[in-house]
Amino acid sequence: MFTGIVEELGEVVALESTGASARLRLRGRLVTEDAGHGDSIAVNGVCLTVAAHGEGEFTADVMAETLRRTTLGSLAPGDRVNLERPVALGGRFGGHLVQGHVDGVGTVVDRTPGDAWESVTVALPPGLARYVADKGSVAVDGVSLTVVAAGDDSFTVGLIPTTLASTTLGLRRPGEPVNLEVDVLAKYLARQFDLQTGAAPEPRQETTR
């Protein structure tokens, strides 16, 4: 379990195809300080398992389904990525419940600079709008954010200077894709509502890890 509070801006060292899957090697000195084989690290909001580590780098295997349903397949050496270790039991919980299971890929459609922050609008893939609400939580590339305004097919968030400087969201331009994970509590509530009312859920992309 993660909280969406990015610990470190890492860097892609290599993305090597292994047939139906890929092996991703990343540099992240902070998140590898106490990393062990089999540990989890979130990369741009995708929970990956450490297969090897050493000298400030770690390697993770990424299956084809994850490559297809997230932005990880488009990474290239030198790209910056958001990195977060799982929250420790009893640790500070600064963001919201983030599983590292991406619900869909959105697209940055607009950025509007403000005096001390920036307003960013992200287009939603089909079926996810029902889980996004004003003042609710959403993870964008693994960053826990509060929804300023929720629309039928998009939502807007406000990014403070720390978020702009310390995460990849300061680099995302209109037209670029981002990984989205909606609030897990919203998904459970929507599921219960559908079961109790007999409503057919909206079609949406399958969640993937």
Image: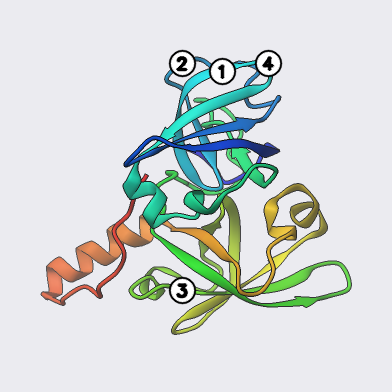
Position above or below: 165 against 160: above
User: Looking at the image, which residue is at 77% across and 60% down?
Assistant: 160
The tag earlier along the polypeptide, 2 or 4, is 2
Which residue corresponds to mark 3? 124
x, y percent for residue 79: 67, 47
Q: Nearer the viewer, mark 4 or mark 3?
A: 4
The tag earlier along the polypeptide, 2 or 3, is 2
Could you classify mark 1 by the number of other residues whose Cα lies within 10 Å: few (under 14), some (14-19), or many (20 or more)?
some
Q: Are marks 2 and 3 in contact (CB under 8 Å)?
A: no
At mark 3, the secondary structure is: loop
Q: Which mark is residue 53?
A: 1
The tag earlier along the polypeptide, 2 or 1, is 2
At mark 4, the secondary structure is: loop
Residue type (three-letter) at the residue carrying disc 3: Leu
Could you classify mark 3 by the number of other residues whose Cα lies within 10 Å: few (under 14), some (14-19), or many (20 or more)?
many
Q: Which mark is residue 37?
A: 2
Residue 109 sits in quarter: bottom right
Q: CA distance from mark 2 to mark 1?
A: 7 Å
How many numbered marks, from 0 up?
A: 4
Q: CA distance from mark 4 to mark 1?
A: 7 Å
Q: Are marks 4 and 1 in contact (CB under 8 Å)?
A: no
Q: Nearer the viewer, residue 194 or 82?
A: 82
Q: Residue furthest right?
A: 115
Residue type (three-letter) at the residue carrying disc 4: Glu
Q: Quadrant of the N terminus?
A: top left
Could you classify mark 2 by the number of other residues whose Cα lies within 10 Å: few (under 14), some (14-19), or many (20 or more)?
few
